[in-house]
Amino acid sequence: NEYKSYLRMSKEQQGVPPPYDPQGYPQQAYPPQQYPPQQYPPQQYPPQQYPPQQGYPQQGYVAQAYPAQQYGGQQVIVVQNQAPPPNNEILAWVACLFFCMPLGLVAVLKSRESSRLASLGNMNGAREYGEQARKWATAAIITSICMGVAVGIFYGVYIATIVSDNVY
């Protein structure tokens, strides 16, 4: 009974979309491009002769020079993949974990920023932040070594003073 009432309904009531009318939509025109047509010089390739193959008859095929092709005013940009510059991340982590932690942490943050800029394609910014990371990591290592030497001298003098005071 429900099926018969479904068949009696109009197509709009059944959920069937109306037929497509291509005339009902306005034509979309793109604005003309303002690029001048580019002229490419004709390319002349030298004829190529291949050595004869044994067991096959000699044929006289010569490569043809094709006329230059004209492209319809489109500019082609070629992007070359560049290797990312060094971000000095390992040096920064070593400086942070084993030497002066505050300066090493700055080096780690600079190296992460270098990696982020390299992934975005900004190689100059990545190179700059990688160099800054190296400088901060080097500063952390040098600072830690200098502090270690200073503390060693201090303890040496302190122990020498205690020992010399106890000798009668």
Image (cartoon, rainbow, N blue to C red):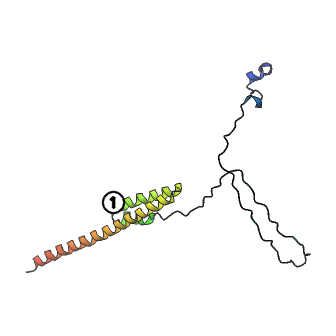
The image shows residue 82, relative to residue 71, as above or below, that is below
Q: Nearer the viewer, residue 126 or 18?
A: 126
Taking the spot 33% from the left edge, 69% from the top edge, the residue there is 142
Taking the spot 80% from the left edge, 65% from the top edge, the residue there is 65
* Other-residue count near label 1 (Cα within 10 Å), few / some / many at <14 / 14–19 / ≥20: few
- 3 vs 168, left or right, is right
Q: Amino acid at mark 1?
A: Pro
Asked if residue 21 shows in the view, the reply is: no
Counting the numbered discs, the total is 1
Using the rendered view, name the quadrant where residue 39 is placed: bottom right
Q: Nearer the viewer, residue 106 or 96?
A: 106
Taking the spot 24% from the left edge, 73% from the top edge, the residue there is 152
Q: Quadrant of the N terminus?
A: top right
Q: Secondary structure at mark 1?
A: helix
Residue, far right: 57
Q: Nearer the viewer, residue 22 or 34?
A: 34
Q: Quadrant of the C terminus?
A: bottom left
* Residue at the disc numbered 1: 102
Where residue 14 sits: x, y (%)? 75, 24
The image shows residue 157, relative to residue 7, as above or below, that is below
Where residue 162 sits: x, y (%)? 14, 74
Using the rendered view, name the quadrant where residue 16 is placed: top right
